Amino acid sequence: MHLPDIVNALMTQMPPVLRWCGAVARRLRQFNIALGGKSSGSALTDALTLADLTVQEIIVAALRDTDPIFRRCRIEAEEENGDLALFSTDSPYTIAIDPIDGTKQYRDKTGNGYCCMLSMRSVDTLHYSLVYIPEAGPTGRWVQAV
């Protein structure tokens, strides 16, 4: 498994997936979707919504199904749902997912700075990052770094 192959696959497969996830999050935000049960010890950041679980499910399914190279990576997901057990447990590369970064702001409707995030790293280096900001203009905005 070569790093450029993983990065190229992420760059090809994941931008449309995160855009779809942003559209789902934007739509779900119109409803009461707050869920209990998340506790890191900080009331300032603890927030869980149906959108977090839904968006993560979509991202994990896309990683599972779009290219077998992704299943050879570790997966680090903010929530505990999706087929996480189908991914490697001993790869040097980790794909990290934050389905709704800024969930408290998203849930409480106190701002529009939430985003869907995915990154790929080794132990000491970030190799790829993709962020989609659904509320940044009529079609959202991408931030992608290699």
Image (cartoon, rainbow, N blue to C red):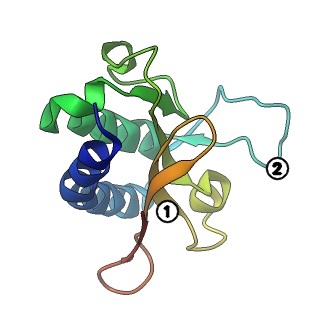
Query: Looking at the image, how many numbered discs can be counted on the residues?
Result: 2
Give the amino acid at mark 2.
Answer: Leu
Could you tell me how far apart the alpha carbons at marks 2 and 1 are, in whole angstroms? 18 Å
Q: What residue is pinned by disc 2?
A: 44
- Which residue does the image show at 26% across and 58% down from the upper left? 11
Q: Residues within 10 Å of mark 2 (few under 14, many from 20)?
A: few
Picture coordinates of residue 9 (x, y %)? Answer: 21, 48
Which residue is pictured at 85% across the width and 32% down the height? 41
Residue density around tag 1, few if under 14, some if 14–19, many if 20 or more, within 10 Å: many
Residue 102 visible, this angle: yes
Q: Which residue is mark 1?
A: 115
Task: Look at 66% across and 54% down and name the residue there.
Answer: 104
Placement of 103 over or under 134, stated as above or below: above
Of pointers 2 and 1, the one earlier in the residue sequence = 2
Residue type indicated by callout 1: Cys
Judged from the image, the secondary structure of the residue bearing numbered disc 1 is: strand
Task: Tell us which disc is closer to us: 2 or 1.
Answer: 1
Q: Is residue 38 above or below residue 84?
A: below
